[in-house]
Amino acid sequence: MHVRYFQADLKHFRIKENYDVIYSSGVIHHILPEWRNELFEDYREHTVSGGFNAFNVFVQKPYIPVPPDSDGDDDTWYSGELLRLYADWHVPVFQEKEFECSSGNTPHRHCMNILIARKPE
Ligand SMILES: C[S@@+](CC[C@H](N)C(=O)[O-])C[C@H]1O[C@@H](n2cnc3c(N)ncnc32)[C@H](O)[C@@H]1O
């Protein structure tokens, strides 16, 4: 198997080929609201029919304080927003999980949405 590595800024990176799977973990909270529709349209368009997109994202909850180690982007996604971007795909997995975290040495909580979506054939 051939694996190609490269580095790019999410904001400017656009996919040029089609893929079976597009996946990211712990990153898309950096995609600001004004970029989301365009970037996810790019990911969706460049997924083959029957292919998968899999993402997780931190989401805001009014009863969970902004994490102490927040870089400012962590609370801009709302619960269910990622699911809405895949409203017209199959969604075999969608979960919302709350969990404890001690990054930055201060105990705090996060809420995360987890999605696996399959593009219709
Ligand atoms: C919490 S880490 C997750 C890393 C890895 N996916 C993992 O699960 O361990 C978030 C990563 O997003 C990267 N990142 C932040 N802003 C970005 C941007 N605009 N474009 C691309 N990557 C970015 C950071 O450099 C960091 O490596």
Image (cartoon, grey):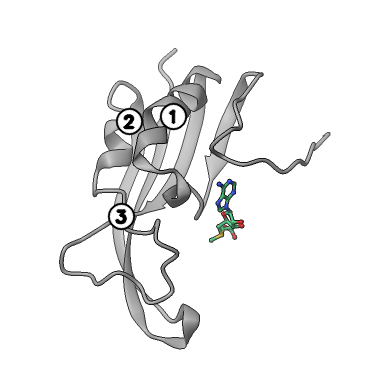
| Residue at the far top in the pictured view | 121
Label 2: element kind: loop
The residue indicated by pointer 1 is 40
For residue 68, which quarter of the picture? Answer: bottom left
Q: Position of residue 106 (x, y in %)?
A: 40, 86
Q: Residues within 10 Å of mark 1 (few under 14, many from 20)?
A: some
Spot occupied by residue 27 in the image (x, y as percentages of width and height) = 51, 51
Q: Which residue is mark 3?
A: 59
Which class describes the residues within 10 Å of circle 2: few (<14), some (14-19), or many (20+)?
Answer: some
Where residue 120 sits: x, y (%)? Answer: 40, 16
Q: Quadrant of residue 9?
A: top right
Q: Amino acid at mark 2?
A: Leu
Q: Name the mark on residue 85.
A: 2
Q: Disc 1 and disc 2: Cα gap in Å?
A: 7 Å
The mark nearer the N terminus, 3 or 2, is 3
Three-letter amino acid code at the position of disc 3: Val
At 43% across and 23% down in the image, what residue appears? 41
Alpha-carbon neighbours of circle 3 within 10 Å: few (<14), some, or many (≥20)?
A: many
Q: Is residue 71 left or right of residue 93?
A: right
Q: Secondary structure at mark 3?
A: loop
Tell which residue pokes out farthest to the right in this image: 2
In this rendering, does residue 44 appear at all? Answer: yes
Q: Earlier in the sequence, mark 3 or mark 1?
A: 1
Residue situated in front as seen by the camera: 114 or 73: 73
Q: Are marks 1 and 2 in contact (CB under 8 Å)?
A: yes
Residue 92 lies in what quarter of the image?
top left
Q: Amino acid at mark 1?
A: Phe
In this rendering, the answer to whether 81 lies above or below 87 is below
